[in-house]
Image (spheres, coloured by chain):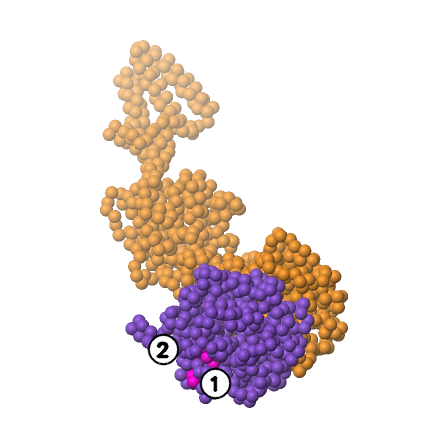
């Protein structure tokens, strides 16, 4: 299975034949899984079991503010704290009434499509913890917590569904058989449970199940430092699954789980090793350059490590920016799994700053607007409607700032 | 002609003409009355005897003639003895006088308004050419011309003395002379240290005593400064405080029937100026942290003025703050981040505008001791909720906060988060003493020991801060069940510890949170200096769905944030604060404040938590509370002037704590002598200011200090706060204390004496003043009594009668 370039081009107003074919590989579920990767997480503040305590003069978690930031000082009455930004709102500029209406309809659809057992499924993925996890994240995007907030009831049921499907060995699976392996669903579910940790006081088993879920991920890190679909150490890794796992582990550290730093370092090294100078990333070691979404994955890996001036991060960001500016909305919508891919690219562009984020977000809104159905649903090219709608809702709600994954 | 002949015949000095009235009178006879009567009797007897003798020799007609002549002669002599005279009354017309009084005090050096009609504006005009004095000189020059057509004009200058500058002669119908230029030349520069308008009027009237004074034209800015209390002229005429001097001046003018016309130079509007009036800078600031300076800026340039206020450190610009200034006084907080340790000199600098009163007040210097310090925070959390993550990140990003996290739910071999990771939760009193603030975020009370609880309480009692964040996992009820006594005392709110958390409940109904009155005033909740702007920030506070149930805020606490809407069984207090001896405890029942990341991402969210932590740490970190601001109404006073000392308590919780306490201000003189003054709270509910007045008597450098230790505080008697502020008492001209003109007072003075007032655009009609000044000449009456008994007429008549009598007797051969 190959992932070809996601670049698309328009020449003389017409798209060239054969271009924008990155996601037009045969419609296989495998591709979905290949692309269906992502994660969310808090920025850990110097924690973790095997981390070395920092040097006395070091200030972990305190990236040096730029010179410009340092000049920007604000204050209050007597004893004001220093803050690093000005009171400027991306949200009010980006969240137009039109966008809010799109979000409302999408969330309404997500709530409606919840199954009686609390889980969500999709055409290709019935009764799926992965889809459930994405739906939960979408509902958390509006500021809800389990049993708190406009989507609190549905969110609580979704979380219960995930918790109820944590197996004794730590795997979070809702079905017995997975064609390509359960890692995506497991990792996303772990992410959701980590994010609601502390807000589900009625589930005393949450911590224990999370600990087991994390342990099984650690157990199956491959020799190249990454992970892939199946819970096995053998074989090669891919950057998408690896990034999702790293996300989950990173949030796990912040949530008080002792995770060896070496595990994360090896994972990051694997992703970095697949970077190309032009901003693209290899999906797998020795493979073809991946799509723009995979560049988003690569960029995120650098952001998570705090390597903000790494040349590959700069190149990846510019590549994503260039691609989205170059393509028309119609072109983007023709890219298979485009909506799902925006989750990675949106996080990368959000972290890159408003100069990248604003034009990117506006382009995505314009594109998604053309794709949204009357009932609020979004479809991928295979007819799945729940997970793309959940992802679209997550991306559209990003300016709200409620989701920890959208942080600078 | 007839009068002239008669005047000569009678030997009179005064002419007898139409302008004079003559009345004959008898002067005092030189003899006493009995001697005169005796003389008359003797003459009668003599003449009788002579008549009888002559009758024997003459005929009857001859006897009668002689007899008549002798009688007339005797009567004439008698008349001479009675000294006949003329009482002559003469009238004299003199020219009336107009006195021009020009104020030459220093306040007249101040510039006038742009559109003053008496001044011609030219580019690059020196300031003296657009001063009030220049207007006064122009007014005097223009007035003398029409006035000298009908009057004599005397030009005086006055300040604390009165000087005659020019006596301008009556020119009548002759063409104007070059006197105007001479007047302008004579009025060059004002030098008077004081202004005494009332005295100037009285002295002018005295000076012109005996002359017909048609009017006094007073040309001044209307500011009288001789008493040291500002414009006493204004007070007197305003009727608020009667002033004897002014009353006397008005009475004197009325008695002489002299109208005082006033010409006001300048306006009551403040002069064009942009000034840093005063600033309050901290004595110490933290390295790499925001240093805030409260500054009062006076904007008399134009409303809604946009300026960039520069902050310079050791002469180098380090920050510029764009300010939008309303007309008048503006209070702003200016911030900078000191990057170098030690005693540093800072300057605030405003841009200079043309035509400002002075540019010297566009900048102000201050010194700050920049020290390196850390704010140690211990953040204990029961479980890693979203709020926990956001708070931890927020604190970790802060340059002076050194946070150590302790996640109770973490793995046993977990490296705890924070700037300074800790391996175990502090146990002993000494361990806890290292921290300035402790945060208990929905903690598992079973993981706290008795020793830790005691140490925590001691930390707060000694000035440390404690922040309770109530959560859903454990809840405050469980904390109180397990750690009852001390935690209950520390908590600012009443919690029903028997109320079990209902985890099955779904919270879908949103509610709004609003600041209480105390919350609106509290510095923690202050994100903008301007109330309106601050309200706008708070209007962005999101709605919430869950909060920890409370019964109420304690009576010793201050509720700062409350739930809005219908009452529920969960209470309404969301955030509350109470002082606990030297420390302070804050409670928040909200666990989703992270929703405030919309719309400004971390901006307001971070500011809230960092501001809160700084506030809680203040007493311990800085050695005393900084929630008070001590200031005097000015920084420089004149001897005898009243110094107003104000202490503003910025924290309602501190105010609550001070309610039963007596505050004293100590004024320390240069010599070291101290005077303690009781500070009185200003009346009113929710008032946060204490005030004391001090009369500065001696010149020198002073310092006022207000420190306060709780009467019922712990044994170390460390003060709750200790604030000082310097001020100076020095001899200074009062001329610039209030630089605005006072046309109102001038108008009242004119009205009180029947004069006219000219000010601002009314100065265009200044020429009409000459028409209103009466020009009747002065009539002076001269009365003289002139004897005429020794006049030629009498001599001739006497000689004629006596000669006739002699000739007749000779002819009739009686001789």
For residue B82, say whether it is visible.
yes
Image location of residue A370, percent across then percent down:
41, 65
Q: Residues within 10 Å of mark 1 (few under 14, many from 20)?
A: many
Q: Residues within 10 Å of mark 2 (few under 14, many from 20)?
A: some
For residue B638, say whether it is visible.
no
Chain painted in orange in the figure: B
Apparent side of residue B611 relative to residue B557 in the rendered image (left or right): left
Q: Which mark is residue B626?
A: none
Q: Which residue is mark 1?
A: A284
Q: Chain of mark 1?
A: A
Residue segment shown in magenta:
A288-298
Name the secondary structure under disc 2.
loop
Q: Which residue is mark 2?
A: A19
Res B122 quadrant in image: bottom left
Compared to A285, does B667 lie above or below? above
Q: In this rendered view, identify the residue nearer to me: A112 or B90.
A: A112
Q: In this rendered view, identify the residue nearer to me: B319 or B266.
A: B319
**Which residue is found at the position 63% from the left and 75% from the top?**
A166
Name the secondary structure under disc 1.
loop
Q: Earlier in the sequence, mark 1 or mark 2?
A: 2
**Which residue is found at the position 72% from the left and 67% from the top?**
B479
Q: Chain of mark 2?
A: A
Q: In this rendered view, identify the residue nearer to me: B104 or B557.
A: B557
Question: In the figure, what tint was chain A given?
Answer: purple
Res B83 quadrant in image: top left
Give the residue at the far top of this rendering: B60
Compared to B38, does B588 lie above or below? below
The reply to whether discs 1 and 2 touch (Cβ–Cβ < 8 Å) is no
Total numbered badges shown on the rendered structure: 2
Res A337 quadrant in image: bottom left
For the residues marked 1 and 2, what is the alpha-carbon distance in whole angstroms?
Answer: 22 Å
Image location of residue B726, percent across then percent down:
56, 66
């Amino acid at each position: 299975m190959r992932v070809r370039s996601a670049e698309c081009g328009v020449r003389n107003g017409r798209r060239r034949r054969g271009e924008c074919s990155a996601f037009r590989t045969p419609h296989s579920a495998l591709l979905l899984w290949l692309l269906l990767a992502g994660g969310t997480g808090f920025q850990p503040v110097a924690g973790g079991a095997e981390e070395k305590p920092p040097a006395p003069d070091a200030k972990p978690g305190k990236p040096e503010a730029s010179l410009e930031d340092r000049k920007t000082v604000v204050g209050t009455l007597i004893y004001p704290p220093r803050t690093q930004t000005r009171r400027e709102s991306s949200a009010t500029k980006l969240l137009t009434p039109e966008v809010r209406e799109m979000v409302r309809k999408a969330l309404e659809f997500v709530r409606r499509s919840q199954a009686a057992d609390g889980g969500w499924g999709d055409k290709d993925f019935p009764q799926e913890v992965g889809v459930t996890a994405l739906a939960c994240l979408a509902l958390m995007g509006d500021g809800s917590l389990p049993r708190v907030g406009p989507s609190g009831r549905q969110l609580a049921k979704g979380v219960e569904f995930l918790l109820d499907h944590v197996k004794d060995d730590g795997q979070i699976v809702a079905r017995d058989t997975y064609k390509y392996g359960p890692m995506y669903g497991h990792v996303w579910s772990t992410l959701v449970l980590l994010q609601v940790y502390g807000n589900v006081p009625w589930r005393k088993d949450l911590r224990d199940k999370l600990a087991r879920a994390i342990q099984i991920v650690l157990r199956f890190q491959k020799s190249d430092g990454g992970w892939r679909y199946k819970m096995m150490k053998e074989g090669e890794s891919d950057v998408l699954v690896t990034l999702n796992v790293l996300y989950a582990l990173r949030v796990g550290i912040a949530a008080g789980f002792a995770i060896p730093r070496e595990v994360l370092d090896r994972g990051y090294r694997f992703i970095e090793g697949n970077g190309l100078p032009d901003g693209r990333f290899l999906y797998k070691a020795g493979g073809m350059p991946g799509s723009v979404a995979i560049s988003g994955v690569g960029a995120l890996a650098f952001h998570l490590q705090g390597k903000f001036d790494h040349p590959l991060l700069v190149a990846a960001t510019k590549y994503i920016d260039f691609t989205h500016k170059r393509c028309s909305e119609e072109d983007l919508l023709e890219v298979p799994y485009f909506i799902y891919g925006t989750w990675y690219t949106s996080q990368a562009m959000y972290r890159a700053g408003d100069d990248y984020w604003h034009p990117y977000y506006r382009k995505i809104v314009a594109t998604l607007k053309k794709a949204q159905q009357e009932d609020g649903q979004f479809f991928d090219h295979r007819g799945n409607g729940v997970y793309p709608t959940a992802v679209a809702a997550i991306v559209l709600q990003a300016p709200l700032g409620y989701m920890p994954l959208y942080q600078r | 002609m007839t009068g002239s002949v008669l005047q000569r015949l009678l030997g009179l000095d005064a002419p007898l003409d139409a302008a004079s009235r003559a009345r004959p009178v008898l002067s005092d006879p030189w003899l006493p009355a009995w001697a005169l009567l005796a003389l008359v009797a003797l003459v009668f007897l003599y003449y009788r005897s002579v008549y009888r003798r002559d009758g024997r020799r003459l005929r009857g007609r001859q006897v009668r003639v002689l007899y008549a002549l002798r009688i007339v002669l005797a009567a004439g002599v008698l008349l001479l003895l009675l000294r006949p005279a003329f009482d002559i009354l003469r009238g004299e017309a003199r020219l009336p006088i107009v006195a021009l009084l020009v104020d030459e005090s220093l306040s007249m050096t101040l510039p006038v308004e742009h559109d003053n009609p008496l001044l011609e504006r030219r580019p690059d005009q020196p300031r003296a050419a657009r001063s009030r004095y220049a207007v006064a000189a122009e007014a005097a020059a223009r007035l003398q011309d029409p006035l000298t057509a009908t009057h004599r004009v005397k030009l005086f200058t006055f300040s604390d003395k009165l000087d005659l500058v020019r006596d301008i002669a009556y020119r009548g119908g002759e063409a104007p002379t070059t006197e105007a230029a001479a007047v302008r030349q004579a009025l060059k520069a004002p030098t008077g240290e004081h202004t005494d308008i009332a005295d100037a009027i009285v002295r002018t009237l005295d000076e012109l005593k005996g002359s017909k004074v048609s009017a006094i034209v007073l040309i001044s800015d209307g500011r009288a400064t001789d008493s040291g209390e500002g414009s006493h002229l204004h007070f007197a005429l305003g009727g608020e405080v009667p002033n004897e001097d002014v009353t006397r001046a008005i009475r004197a003018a009325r008695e002489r029937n002299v109208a005082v016309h006033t010409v006001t130079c300048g306006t009551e509007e403040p002069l064009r100026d942009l000034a840093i009036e005063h600033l309050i800078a901290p004595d110490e600031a933290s390295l790499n942290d925001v240093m805030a300076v409260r500054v009062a800026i006076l904007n008399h340039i134009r409303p809604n003025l946009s300026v960039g206020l520069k902050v310079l450190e050791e002469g180098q610009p380090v920050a510029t703050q764009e300010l939008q200034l309303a007309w008048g006084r503006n209070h702003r907080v200016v911030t900078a981040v000191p990057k170098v340790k030690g005693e540093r000199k800072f300057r605030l600098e405003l841009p200079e505008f043309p035509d400002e009163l002075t540019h010297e007040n566009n900048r102000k210097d201050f010194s700050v001791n920049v020290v390196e310090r850390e704010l140690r925070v211990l953040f204990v959390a029961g479980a890693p909720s979203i709020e926990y993550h956001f708070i931890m990140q927020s604190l970790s990003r802060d340059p002076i906060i050194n946070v150590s996290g302790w996640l109770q739910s973490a793995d046993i071999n977990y490296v705890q988060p924070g700037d300074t990771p800790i391996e175990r939760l502090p146990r002993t009193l000494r361990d806890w003493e290292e921290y300035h603030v402790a945060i208990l975020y929905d903690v598992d009370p079973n993981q706290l020991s008795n020793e830790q609880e005691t140490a925590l309480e001691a930390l707060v009692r000694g000035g440390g801060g404690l922040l309770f964040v109530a959560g859903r996992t454990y809840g405050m009820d469980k904390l109180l069940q397990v750690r009852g006594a001390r935690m209950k005392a520390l908590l600012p709110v009443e919690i029903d510890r028997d109320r079990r958390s209902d985890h099955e409940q779904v919270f879908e109904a949103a509610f709004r949170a609003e600041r209480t009155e105390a919350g609106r005033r509290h510095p923690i909740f202050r994100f903008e200096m301007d109330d309106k702007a601050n309200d706008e920030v708070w209007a962005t506070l999101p709605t919430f769905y869950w909060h920890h149930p409370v019964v109420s805020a304690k009576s010793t606490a201050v509720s700062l944030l409350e739930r809005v809407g219908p009452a529920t069984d969960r209470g309404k207090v969301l955030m509350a604060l109470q002082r606990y001896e030297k420390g302070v405890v804050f409670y928040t029942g909200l666990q989703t404040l992270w929703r405030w990341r919309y719309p400004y991402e971390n901006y307001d969210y971070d500011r809230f938590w960092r501001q809160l932590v700084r506030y809680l740490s203040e007493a311990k970190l800085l050695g005393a509370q900084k929630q008070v601001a001590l200031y005097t109404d000015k920084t420089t006073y004149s001897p005898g002037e009243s110094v107003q000392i104000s202490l503003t308590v910025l924290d309602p919780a501190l105010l609550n704590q001070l309610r039963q306490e007596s505050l004293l201000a100590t004024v320390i003189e240069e010599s070291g002598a101290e005077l303690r003054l009781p500070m009185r709270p200003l009346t009113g509910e929710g008032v946060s200011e204490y005030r004391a007045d001090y009369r500065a008597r001696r010149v020198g450098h002073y310092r006022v200090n207000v420190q306060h230790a709780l009467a019922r505080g712990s044994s170390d008697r460390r003060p709750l706060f200790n604030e000082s502020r310097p001020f100076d008492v020095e001899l200074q001209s009062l001329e610039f204390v209030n630089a605005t003109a006072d046309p109102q007072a001038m108008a009242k003075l004119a009205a009180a004496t029947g004069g006219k007032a000219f000010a601002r655009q009314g100065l265009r009609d200044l020429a009409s003043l000459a028409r209103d000044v009466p020009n009747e000449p002065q009539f002076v009456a001269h009365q003289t009594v002139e004897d005429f008994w020794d006049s030629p007429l009498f001599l001739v008549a006497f000689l004629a009668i006596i000669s006739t009598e002699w000739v007749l007797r000779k002819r009739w051969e009686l001789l």
